[in-house]
Amino acid sequence: MIPRWSRTLGNLYRHSKSSIQRDLYVLPCRKISRIPAVEMPVASDASVKSEVDLNKMFRSKPCSLALPPESPMRIEEPTYEGLRHFLLKMMLFYSKQSKCIRQANVIYRRVVSQADKPAIYDVFRLEKTFRTNFSMLVVHMWLCLRRLKAEGKEGVELGQYVYEIYNHDLETRVSKAGVNLLLSKWMRELEKVFYGNIVAFNTAMLPEAKHDDLQNAIWKNVFAEDGSSKLDATALPAVLAFTRYIRRECICLSLTDKEAMFSGNFMFTPLDNPKP
């Protein structure tokens, strides 16, 4: 059975000759902005915004994002012996599905860790609102799903578990933002945004894409509050830096081995202490 997120993308790509890709990734901005504002954590050192030279950032050579064996950030599969192992086996703890769910949870924790850190908003000079936080979640979900898909059917199946966890978390976030009535309607709208963004980013990464396609997609989906296609000159340094960040993370993830990706033992480039 083809996972839902993969099947939906396939249907969208069949309409590549129409305007669906262009329309999808700009439609949601006004609707998302109507979700009540939520108090978000503020960086302890707001001066990061003025200290960072965006023009020099994310130009270093890409490298694997896999965590080293001695890293305290690694999360290993639990090992049990004797009666406990037997009981857990009887409870299907070691089944393929259970293992995939545990792996997907760790992978999604990596996504949330990067998308929720105040540093990423300070570096790229964004106000942390529900809309920008959702945009960051989508971007980093896309990065992970894109990398997992490169591993074939096994990666696509694991990506489906990650997507389901993301959906559950997103529903909780929308509820906390004050949307209790018509929640299912909001979730459907956000699902359209998710798929529209992924199509836009994937299209911008194709070999035949124009050099500024990814930059334009990032502006419309992450920076522009109203989905405007006209790039604000004052935001250009941040948009260009974010574009380099995305391209670099794509390469870094491609250099990250399968075991690290599937186990979730990787970490996006830290932005707490920005370096070139």
Image: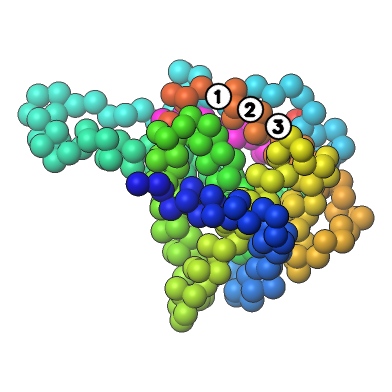
Q: Amino acid at mark 3?
A: Arg
Pointer 1 with pointer 2, Cβ within 8 A: yes
Pointer 2 with pointer 3, Cβ within 8 A: yes
Mark 1 secondary-structure assignment: loop
Pointer 2 local density, CA inside 10 Å: few below 14, some 14–19, many at least 20 = some
Q: Which residue is mark 3?
A: 248
Nearer to me, 144 or 14: 14
Mark 2 secondary-structure assignment: helix
Q: Quadrant of residue 242?
A: top right
Residue positioned most to the right: 233
Q: CA distance from mark 3 to mark 1?
A: 12 Å
Q: Which residue is mark 2?
A: 252
Q: CA distance from mark 1 to mark 2?
A: 6 Å
Pointer 3 local density, CA inside 10 Å: few below 14, some 14–19, many at least 20 = some
Pointer 3 with pointer 1, Cβ within 8 A: no
Q: CA distance from mark 2 to mark 3?
A: 6 Å
- Taking the spot 27% from the left edge, 35% from the top edge, the residue there is 96
Mark 3 secondary-structure assignment: helix
- Sequence-first disc among 3 and 1: 3
61 up-or-down from 178: above or below: above
Q: Amino acid at mark 2?
A: Cys
- Taking the spot 66% from the left edge, 34% from the top edge, the residue there is 249
